[in-house]
Image (spheres, helix red, strand yellow):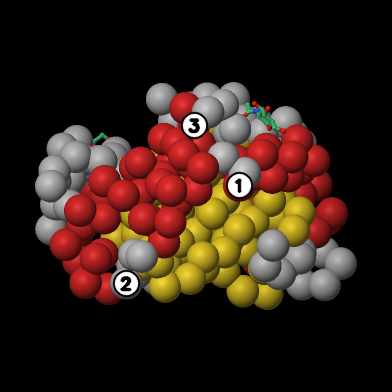
Amino acid sequence: SLLLPSREALATWILVPQVCSSFAAGPRQYDGTFYEFHTYCLKPSKMNEFLENFKKNIRLQTAHSELVGYWSVEFGGRVNKAFHIWKYDNFTHRTEVRKALAKDKKCEEQFLIPNLALIDKQESEITYPVPWCGPALWGDAFKRALNAHVNRGYSKLVGVFHTEYGALNRVHVLWWNESADSRAAGRHQSHEDPRVMAAVRKSVNYLVSQENMFLIPTSFSPLK
Ligand SMILES: *[C@@H]1O[C@H](CO)[C@@H](O)[C@H](O)[C@H]1NC(C)=O
Ligand SMILES: *[C@@H]1O[C@H](CO)[C@@H](O)[C@H](O)[C@H]1NC(C)=O
């Protein structure tokens, strides 16, 4: 269900720590599947060159590793940023993939090394899809806030993830809409909807801060 066609906005919620730890103790994905979120800050004016190399050569990496989506960050946060999600069955699987990549000379020479020269900074987070079950109080509050938006038809939800490794106490929510303008109009409408606002007010009690990024899928992104 994560693989819906999409054009995305990613909201990152930073939660109060005790709320997140109660959640981390909650029920987990049973099959071990996780998603690795990568953010690359590119050197100034290197975005086009970087994306061109990706378009041409990404198959060298996807031969080993499952790409979920690849976006350029249009606004929100730093410009010149690329954001991508990779899927792994479990940590052993990830280790195997990385071993295979390290052995693949063609991939290294044509793809990985040229990319590295264009990247200024990279961040990675390991995330699990949020299970939304169990008694965790805040989980219910967020679920209600999200569902209020979804049920009223304001947005299409692609996935909700929480961090396991990386910056902790974070929940990432990926939404789809056809354009930034229709999303802006939808948000405006939803903010005038008392049912949505009541649900959002409850979930806000568990938030330290939040940030949004608007994402444009690249031509080679499986999620669009
Ligand atoms: C990890 O995933 C691989 C498939 O990529 C599978 O063959 C293996 O059984 C899984 N290991 C565990 C411990 O689940
Ligand atoms: C996009 O936003 C508009 C509101 O402007 C809304 O009517 C529409 O349902 C949204 N589309 C999706 C797929 O969420």
**Label 3 belongs to which residue?**
150
Amino acid type, callout 2: Val
Q: Is residue 13 left or right of residue 17?
A: right
Q: How many marks?
A: 3
| Sequence-first disc among 1 and 2 | 2
Assign a secondary structure to mark 1.
helix
Quadrant the C terminus occupies: top right
Assign a secondary structure to mark 3.
helix
Q: Is residue 113 left or right of residue 172?
A: right
Q: Which mark is residue 191?
A: 1
Asked which quadrant contains residue 89, the reply is: top left
Ligand 1 falls in quadrant:
top left
Q: Position of residue 163 (x, y in %)?
A: 34, 59
Residue 157 makes an appearance in the image = no
Residue 15 makes an appearance in the image = yes
Badge 1 vs badge 2, beta-carbon distance below 8 Å: no
Q: CA distance from mark 1 to mark 3?
A: 13 Å
Q: Position of residue 200 (x, y in %)?
A: 45, 51
Amino acid type, callout 3: Val
| Sequence-first disc among 3 and 2 | 2
Q: CA distance from mark 3 to mark 2?
A: 25 Å
State the residue in front, 103 or 210: 210
Badge 1 vs badge 3, beta-carbon distance below 8 Å: no
Q: Is residue 224 left or right of residue 127?
A: right
Quadrant the N terminus occupies: top left
State the residue in front, 100 or 169: 169
User: Which numbered mark, 1 or 2, is in the foreground of this view?
Assistant: 1
Q: Position of residue 32 (x, y in %)?
A: 22, 42
Q: Which mark is residue 16?
A: 2
The residue drawn where x is 83% and y is 55% is 49
Asked which quadrant contains residue 30, the reply is: top left
Amino acid type, callout 1: His
